[in-house]
Image (tube, rainbow, N blue to C red):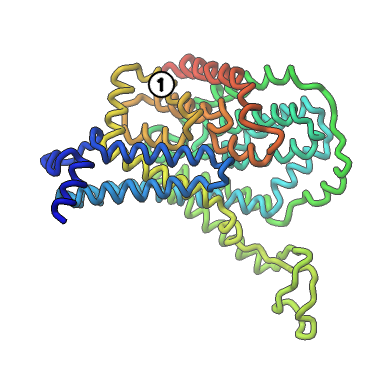
Amino acid sequence: MQKLYYLITGFFFLSPSAYASELGLDMTHTTLGWFCVGLFILAYAFVMLEEVLHLRKSKPVLAAAGIIWVLIGWVYTQQDQSALAEEAFRHTLLEFAELMLFLLVAMTYINAMDERGLFNALRGWLIKKGFSFRQLFWITGFLAFFISPIADNLTTALLMCAVVLKIADNNKAFINMCCVNIIVAANAGGAFSPFGDITTLMVWQAGKVDFFTFFHLFIPSLINFVVPAAIMSFFIKNQTSHPDDKDKFLETLTYKEGAFPILFLFLATIASAVLGHILIHMPPVLGMMIGLAYLKLYGFYLRKKGIVDLKHGEQMSSDFLPKNEKDKTTDIPLPFDVFQPLARLEWDTLLFFYGVILCVGGLGFLGYLTLLSESLYGNFSETTSNISLGLISSVIDNIPVMYAVLTMAPDFSSGQWLLITLTTGVGGSMLSIGSAAGVALMGQARGFYSFLGHLKWTPVVALGYFASIYAHLWLNAGLF
């Protein structure tokens, strides 16, 4: 048994006491370290193939995170430093918990507004107006740009894509262009607001940039969207769509009572998070959890007021029927329940986020992020490195890229933190797999929007990427 122990230890760590004298174990040049790196790369390959394999993206990264930290715990236990590994894991878990609770409240509000039909009403208005293709292209783009800072880029992209699919008369070229435009606009809009993207939220919660400083990115973000949109618009035929079933479809696009009060409460929740962070220096998640209480109390008010919605075609509960009509099938009165929006959260996205943070945190604890920081920021300028990381985020999701940068903790000026926020936020627009919005639209608009369809416009999107960077470096020079 002892021989087996030395055999395994020697295979993974070169020698059983190679790093015992270190306060932390530098395992960047060990077999175990490279095994963990390879495991993360393999897990991410499965994530990128989600649409092909139909394997939820959270599953491979959760498995990789668990294995990486089990191996770390085992190594540190053998070196009598298990407390260090435990502290590192708890620190990483706490960072995720703050972000997860923040996102949980924001996503609950978005789903509650969706359940109340607020987004349906917006879709109905767009469809009813009968805009031309070119007008629809610009309107959905600008709406995506201005909605995503308040909601999020994924929800916004799905909403705008649903409008385009309904009234584009199956015009494949136009739908593909609209999807590219929507993704670019939603990602650009999310880059200048802490609520627009997970990466901006991470930078804000880490205290690297205060809330209002993010708005220095408004004009660069707008340029990132407008430059490629202006070029693509020249390739759109200025025709008008007339869907045969438009009137029938519009009948379903109405909002329910409580839609606009919930929107107001969401804005109040954002204000609570921002003011709590600025005035009493508490984490933004505190204000968000107070905001969840706003929604729950309003839900209680709706129930007491007797506001119900009818769900047609299912058997009514015995609570609403007399005894002699227990088997009657009719419309069911459904009171508003805040736990229904909670149940509809993108749990796969939250768990993917958990897996990625733990994977990157584990690799950082092994020493790889220090090595990467020295290689990247030691050999190149901060500006060049941050622009390069934005390009990398077009292949690898921006969440692990930004978390890696935050874990490296480089001594950046406000201008550089805004630059890495901008580049990782909009860099993913260059490829369909570079952002959650792109991956989601490949599924929603299957047959109309694809990886190759997006790739056709990548040079145009890249032009907007570099134009936005130049605008930031010029307009915000005083922040560097």
Secondary structure of the residue carrying numbered label 1: helix
The kind of residue on which mark 1 rests is Leu
Residue 2 falls in image quadrant: bottom left
Q: Residue at x 56, y 25 (%)?
A: 430
The quarter of the displayed image where residue 342 is located: bottom right
Q: Eyeballing the image, is 337 above or below 421?
A: below
Q: Give coordinates of residue 91: x percent, y percent.
A: 30, 47
**Image-quadrant location for residue 222:** top right
Q: Above or below — where is 323 with respect to 426? A: below
In terms of depth relative to the viewer, which is nearer, 134 or 458? 458
- Does residue 203 appear left or right of residue 56 in this picture? left
Residue at left offset 75%, top offset 30% = 172
The image position of residue 120, as x and y in percent, is 73, 47
Q: Quadrant of the N terminus?
A: bottom left
How far across and down, in percent of the image, does residue 101 sit? 46, 51
The quadrant of the image that shows the C terminus is: top left
Q: Is residue 99 visible?
A: no
Residue 472 visible in the snapshot = yes
Residue 74 position within the rendered picture, expressed as x and y whole percent measured from the top left: 23, 51
Residue located 76% across and 22% down the image: 236
Count of labels in the image: 1
> Along the line of sight, which residue is nearer the eye, 9 or 28?
9
Image-based side of 444 in relation to 422, left or right: right
Foreground residue among 207 and 21? 21
* Residue where numbered disc 1 is placed: 479
Q: Name which residue lies at 51% across and 26% down.
A: 427
Of residues 390 and 145, the one nearer the viewer is 390
Neighbor class of circle 1 (other Cα within 10 Å; few <14, some 14-19, many 20+) is: some
